[in-house]
Image (cartoon, grey):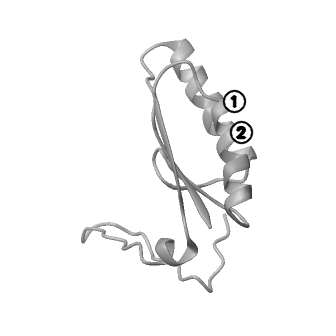
Amino acid sequence: MRLLVFFDLPTATKKERKDYTIFRRFLLKSGYDMLQFSVYCRICKGQDTAERYMSHLETNLPPKGNIRAMSVTNTQYERMKLLIGMDKKEEKIGKNQLLLF
C-alpha cells in the first residue's frame, strides 16, 4: 500500500516559507519520497499503517495551505503512467528497481 500526499502551501512571507520547510522536512523524516514538486509518497505495510501515518499528517499540518492524502494499493500505484515531454530527462523506475539518491 502507498500513501500519497499532495500539498499546496503559501510561500509569500518568511513565516509561510518556514512553515513549508518544516512540513517538507517532516515528510522526509517520516519516510516519504518526493515524486514531483509538492507530491510525496510513502510505502505502508497495510491499511493500519497508512491510517497511522495519516494521523501523523493531521497532527503536523501547517497553519495555512491545502494538503490532500490518498492511500492506494501497490497494484493501483504500479498502473500510474509517467507522461513526460520530449526535453525531459526523467526515467520510469520499475517495481523491481531500487532508486538511490
Question: Which residue type carries mark 2?
Answer: His
Residue placed most toward the observer, 100 or 6: 6
Quadrant of the image containing the N terminus = bottom right
Relative to 93, say whether 56 is above or below: above
Taking 71 as reference, is 89 left or right? left
Q: At which x and y percent is residue 89?
A: 39, 69
Q: At which x and y percent is residue 28?
A: 68, 47
Residue placed most toward the observer, 71 or 43: 71
Q: Are marks 1 and 2 in contact (CB under 8 Å)?
A: yes
Residue at position x 72%, y 53% in the image: 31
Q: Dot 2 surroundings within 10 Å: few (below 14), some, or many (20 or more)?
A: some
Question: Which residue type carries mark 1?
Answer: Thr
**Residue 68: which disc?**
none
Q: At which x and y percent is residue 3?
A: 59, 56
Taking 100 as reference, is 9 left or right? left
Residue at position x 31%, y 70% in the image: 83
Quadrant of the image containing the C terminus = bottom right
The residue tagged 1 is 59
Say which element carries label 1.
Answer: helix
Numbered marks: total: 2
**Residue 56: which disc?**
2
